[in-house]
Image (tube, rainbow, N blue to C red):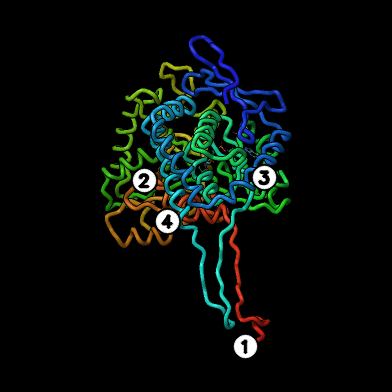
Amino acid sequence: MVLYSLFQGDFVVQEYKLHIGGESRDSATGETFDNINPATLENLATVQVAGSEDVDRAVEAAEEGFRVWSEVPAPRRAEVLFRTARILQERKEDLARLMTEEMGKVLPETRGDVQEAIDIAIYAAGEGRRMFGETTTSELKDKFCMTVLRPIGVVGMITPWNFPLAIPGWKIMPALIAGNAIVFKPASDTPLLAIKLVEILMEAGLPPGVVNLVTGPGGSTGKAIVQHPRIKAISFTGSLETGKWIMEECAKTMKRVSLELGGKNPVIIMDDADLELALEGVLWGAFGTTGQRCTATSRLILHEKIKDEFTARLLAKTKLLRVGNGLLPETDIGPIINKAQLEKIERYVRIGMEEGATLLLGGKAIDPGLPGYFFEPTVFTDVRPDMRIAQEEIFGPVLSIITVSGLEEAIEVANNTRYGLSSAIYTENVGKAFRAVKKIEAGITYVNAPTIGAEVHLPFGGVKGTGNGFREAGTEAIKEFTEIKAVYIDYSGRLQRAQIDME
Ligand code: NAP
């Protein structure tokens, strides 16, 4: 998909085309955008802007791809996914390095991101030999009833930048095993990994037109996908604001829409918790991926009895975290994705201080000797549950400490946001752990583990403002990308009327 390579200083800047109908295509707009490394501000690649004409062509190609792919038996489709997993495995290190360059997170984490794409490819491929419907009895004689799963058709996928392979993988692999065709728009901050993924799928033997890649801004390319009358469903991961708009738009063309949106994830530390274990979990949950995870720990709900001790230990450990280039082994925290996001974090720090929270640590952009967007790990205390820094998603390395007097209050505080993605409790008391599992309003609850760490064979997603009831990964992912049909087979040889012929 490379159009040309251009030497710019020491780097090679490649221009990438769109991928439509199995071919590299120039966009109709003739426009391009740069793919910037957030640590060094180098341009990694130039990428084309797809307009609505390009989206039209991608949909047309996907309809053709769907005709072919939906007729391939699911176990045969699985072979493409198994090959995809193998190629991803062979290129894991190169892809991880490229991902660190493209979006900044540290190498161990980008290796994990590639691994997640491998895992979901293998998991979804395995589903190719299941795809179970149900068989059941009929209320009438000599009649047989069952359900079968059918693909939806052409599905539009729009993804964010923080998991550039894992999140597209979570969508693409289950959609493919179910027999759908795809028009895929990745985040504009991470087009390169999406391009690599599509190249690998083609190399693994995916027929032309089954996955079509259109790069470009959400406001134009993404909008054209959402509004396209022949796209049957949208699978979206991103912010609540964009998700709401997409849901409204999809209603106009009666599209199925699955949404995975933001989070304001709490971790509760009870006074009986193993504090060292909890400390490690909070550090990883709050500052891993520079806090730029939908499941990042952003609210630390501390029992008043351990508040002072835990806070002191947390600050001591947080001060040791090193911010810098994610490619270096000594780095704990990579850059913020872009300037707008850095400014948003700065804005929230100001809001926190204006609201009366106490800034214990960090709060500023930092220069680790690179021109990119770096921010200190930041801790606020004296945070009230209704403050904006305790309610709104900041999406950066900012942790807000809220103090409570017991479990019931902790759960009330945990539930007091519009989001409901992930949550965690640290306690040695099994009763308290189960009470939290029962009462916390979230799609995921961890006991004695941080708010991050989803595995691909379990359902992933959230409640309230985090989603609209769908789950990704696990067997739920198949439901996201299939229609269910009820089938009645009457072998009585006569008309039997349900609910009427009762004898
Ligand atoms: P975003 O602004 O909503 O963007 C997400 C994707 O939507 C990008 O590809 C973006 O394109 C596109 N987009 C933007 N406006 C659009 C529109 N009007 N129509 C169609 N597409 C549009 O979110 P973000 O800031 O990149 O990502 C961070 C958010 O994602 C956070 O809220 C985070 O919690 C959430 N997230 C959720 C999960 C989950 O599974 N629950 C996982 C990861 C992230 P451009 O890149 O071109 O703007």
Q: Residues within 10 Å of mark 3 (few under 14, many from 20)?
A: many
Q: Which of marks 2 and 3 is in front?
A: 3
- The answer to whether the residues at label 3 and label 1 have Cβ atoms under 8 Å apart is no
As measured in the structure, the alpha-carbon distance from the residue carrying label 4 to the one carrying label 3 is 48 Å
Q: Which of marks 4 and 3 is in front?
A: 3
From the image, tell me which residue sits under label 4.
411
Q: Nearer the viewer, mark 4 or mark 2?
A: 2
As measured in the structure, the alpha-carbon distance from the residue carrying label 3 to the one carrying label 1 is 45 Å
As measured in the structure, the alpha-carbon distance from the residue carrying label 2 to the one carrying label 3 is 42 Å
Disc 1 secondary structure class: loop
User: Taking 59 as reference, is 459 left or right?
Assistant: left
> Which of 319/211 is in front?
211
From the image, tell me which residue sits under label 3.
63
Task: Specify the amino acid type for callout 1.
Answer: Met
From the image, tell me which residue sits under label 2.
450
Q: Nearer the viewer, mark 3 or mark 1?
A: 3
Q: Is mark 1 within 8 Å of ligand 1?
A: no
Outermost bottom residue: 503
From the image, tell me which residue sits under label 1.
502
Task: Specify the amino acid type for callout 3.
Answer: Glu
Point out residue 188 in the picture as x, y percentages from the top left corner. 58, 30
| Image quadrant assignment for residue 144 | bottom right
Residue at position x 70%, y 41% in the image: 60
Residue at position x 61%, y 90% in the image: 503
